[in-house]
Amino acid sequence: MSIKKSIFIACLKMGKRKERLRNAQNKPFDVEKSRKSIEILNKLIGWLQPVRNDIKREMTHVDGMPGVHIDNPSSTQRVILYLHGGAYIKGLKHLSSLYHYFSAELAVACEAEVWMPDYRLAPEYPYPAALEDVYAAYQSLLSKGVEPRHLFVIGDSAGGGLTLALLMKLRDEGKPLPKAAVTLSAWTDLALTGESMIKRDDLDPMLSYKPVSDVPPLIIQKGQEKDPYISPLYGNYKNFPPLMMLVGGQEILYDDTLRVVEKAKKAGVNVTLEIEEEMPHVYPVFAGILPEGKKAIEHISLFVKKNVV
């Protein structure tokens, strides 16, 4: 194991131990403390995997909301709408180094322009604010002249769930769908019914069931746990574009991906599933630290290019 990887995994486990201690002491979940903790991890990640400086990146606005735009480093017409993770409660200002790094790597590997909206966060703006924002961002790209056949939606964790929910909303409203979509460790079930939530709790170096269970009440009202637009596991996948879904074998959200893959395949969707058994949650975004993450970016690039008309 490399020094970078050792430091990274040790920090993940330390964060998980702190969360478990908080729960053992029956301390309530504190959103601001959680955000500050992730900002510390974000700084470490920025040191372990520096952002490349050979492409143009700018802070911009996507349909009125703040975001990041990365110019296409090639001459292709490909555009990626990237939906960041953060459990719906953390945004780009908390995870800037991580997502500036990963979006740049995606842009280069996929030879694509990348737009990354900084959608509104819970609990200040609960469901359906995030979905409304990414829906508006998608429509904004179409209004700029981006053709759906050149457009890809990619998201990780909560952003992976948003990716699937966005596709459902677009389809349900008769709007043009993107050419294909990719999810990384998608959070698809805010009811938290997956067996892996418990069975892989000790295996997961990053997430733990009890702290995760504190988050849905910040996002949704009671009774909305199985609304497909926030928990796309419970939705219908008929007429979806091709999907690529990646998940780490160590994570408690493992079943959130596996169950969606099963449903989507039964609906006739062309689904590519990749499982890295020894990897944690959203491992591709740590490509500068984890060799498996670098390989995942290569595979995402191949998937995107394969689905270009």
Image: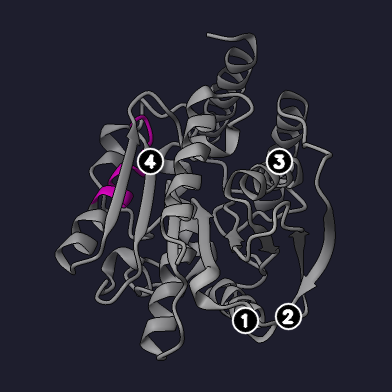
Q: In this rendering, which labeled residue sits more in front, label 4 or label 3?
A: 3
**Image position of 145 (left or right of 43):** left
Q: CA distance from mark 3 to mark 1?
A: 25 Å
Q: CA distance from mark 4 to mark 3?
A: 20 Å
The colour mode here is one colour
Circle 4 sits on which residue? 247
**Dot 4 crowding, Cα within 10 Å, few <14, some 14–19, many 20+:** many
In the picture, the disc for residue 136 is: 1
Determine whether 192 is above or below 119 in the image. Answer: above
Determine whether 161 is above or below 105 in the image. Answer: below
Closer to the chain start, of discs 4 and 3, is 3
Identify the secondary structure beneath mark 4.
Answer: strand
Q: Please give the range of residues in magenta.
A: 249-258
Closer to the chain start, of discs 3 and 1, is 3
Q: CA distance from mark 4 to mark 2?
A: 31 Å
Closer to the chain start, of discs 1 and 4, is 1
Q: Residue at x 42, y 60 (%)?
A: 307
Q: Residue at x 40, y 72 (%)?
A: 222
